Image (cartoon, rainbow, N blue to C red):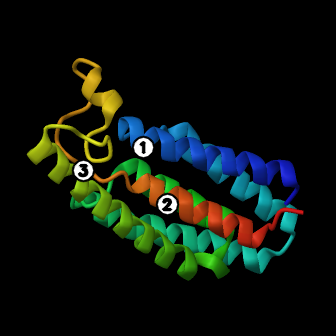
Amino acid sequence: MPMPLVQIAGLILATAAISDLCWRRIPNILALALAVLGIVHLALDFDAASAGWSIAAASAVLLLLVIAWTRNWIGGGDVKLAAAAVLLIGYRRVPDFLVLTALLGGGIALLTLADIYVDRFYGRSLGFAFPVAARRAEGFGSDKPSVPYGIAISAAGLLMLFQVFPPR
């Protein structure tokens, strides 16, 4: 994959992480753009078997995460972002991506719990559990704590992306 496309993918993932942290929303356009880059990468690769397996892996991740979404365990933007990231990084890296996402997500969940504790006992949020931008804007967002799992997905996607396409 040409380096500008890798840089664009990195920018998309970073934007998704920032959006999830600030507003608890990952715009559909970001997941769509990442999926398009994944398809472009598969088209440039010219390996039908690899493309097929990558599409199957992305579909499997999408299906499993949609089930998690129906149970309110994960947000819809997270589902789309993770499936698009799998499409981009390819099927060979899916286990590493999922384990790394889970580990990073656990760390983010701990930060979220710490933020809830600080907010409850000291009356000040660190901005992790309660999106600062959402709290300040009237009628937007909620004071209900949530885990910005898009950060973990984006970070794992970036790390896998740089493993697949190392900077030169």
* Residue to which mark 3 is pinned: 115
Quadrant of the rendered structure where residue 64 is? bottom left
Q: Secondary structure at mark 3?
A: helix
Question: Is the N terminus in the top left, top right, bottom left or bottom right quadrant?
Answer: bottom right
Q: Residue furthest left?
A: 121
Q: Residue at x 32, y 46 (%)?
A: 128
- The alpha-carbon separation of the residues under discs 3 and 1 comes to 16 Å
- The alpha-carbon separation of the residues under discs 2 and 1 comes to 11 Å
The image shows residue 131, relative to residue 128, as above or below, that is: above
Depth check, front residue: 99 or 67: 99
The image shows residue 127, relative to residue 109, as above or below, that is: above
- Report the amino acid beneath label 2: Ile
- Report the amino acid beneath label 3: Asp
Q: Residues within 10 Å of mark 3 (few under 14, many from 20)?
A: many
**Residue 28 point in image, percent of width and height:** 50, 40
Depth check, front residue: 137 or 58: 137
